Image: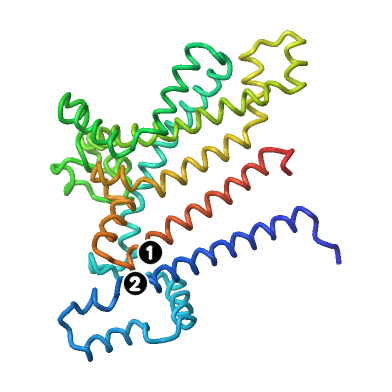
Amino acid sequence: MRPLSTHVIRELQGLLILLLTLFGLLLITFALSAFSPVDRVLQIVGDHASQSTYEQVRHQLGLDQPLPVQFWHYLVNLAHGDLGTASATGQPVLQDLLAAFPATLELATLALIAGAVLGVIAGVLCARFAGSPWDLAVRTVTLLGNSVPIFWLGLLMLALFYAKLQWSAGPGRLDDIYQFTVEPKTGFALIDTWLSGDREAFKNAISHLVLPVALLSYYSLASITRLTRSACLSEMNKEYILLARAKGAGEMTILLRHVLPNIRGTLLTVIALAYTSMLEGAVLTETVFSWPGIGRYLTTALFAGDTTAIMGGTLLIGASFVLINHLTDFLVRLTDPRVR
């Protein structure tokens, strides 16, 4: 029997780490729910329910059993797609999350594309003209992107571009006139409005996306630009760059043909971190722009003290974070022979 190759062993180790990470996420999420000061039973029966009603509902929820038994039931229910029922909406949490997650995914993905493209280009140009007025101006703008509170900038953008200049649509994903006429087939506003055949609704969806996408992409652009510049400058001090210069290669040629391919692993990691940050950190953006995504759903659940909904939303974001990070590691190993 042939022994397993080193590559297969590493892949199995990576899969085991992924499973253990997800299990740890489930355990932490359950612990936060179990030790929460919010009484889930009171949320259901109300403050004026009798003691017998309270005990009956507590027994139905399984909260009178030991914690290990509760955790096992939680895992079994999760395996069957049961995340419980949200007290705020009266619907299954999984159904609420499936309805809200596409809105966050659409917003974060479009913002990532814009932020990554502009951030890499700006970072490369800053490295090419390091110390120039262009470099200083871009670094100042990116520093503001990491310093200004996102909710304040979002409110300022709404006040200026929507209320004052009327250059873009306001909060929400669609105007009321299209909200109930477009069938939500996929949950993505751009795709649904395009499939509906109503081009005005499609343009309206784009108009509503402009401000929140610009806001989120600005914050991702800030970190991507700064780290791309640092990675390029660090790479340009190495010996093979000196050799390329000695052969007469221009600076932009060196950056595009030699530096960028060698920092692609760093770029993939930076972009993935920006993506996960937008998925988990879009709470304030979605609240400011009344965007019906996971962030706004969690905010509503927090104010309502809905522990079940909070646990489900936290689990979804945490699982997305873990899966995106492991997918990024796989892509880095696939595209960079040095890592392999």
Return the disc, 1 or 2, that comes first in the chain's sequence: 2
Describe residue 215's horizontal placement relative to residue 241 as left or right: left
Q: Residues within 10 Å of mark 2 (few under 14, many from 20)?
A: some
**Looking at the rendering, which quadrant does residue 41 occupy?**
bottom left
Could you say where residue 240 lies in the image, as x and y percent from the top left? 76, 21
Snapshot quadrant of residue 228: top right
Q: Amino acid at mark 2?
A: Gly
Q: Is residue 199 visible?
A: no
Residue ID at (22%, 43%): 172
Q: Secondary structure at mark 2?
A: loop
The image quarter containing residue 200 is top left
Measured from the top left, where is residue 18 in percent x and y? 59, 59
Q: Which residue position is annotated with label 2?
A: 84
Q: Residue furthest right?
A: 1
From what the image shows, is residue 333 above or below residue 97?
Answer: above
Residue occupying the far top of the picture: 248
Q: Is residue 309 above or below residue 293?
A: below
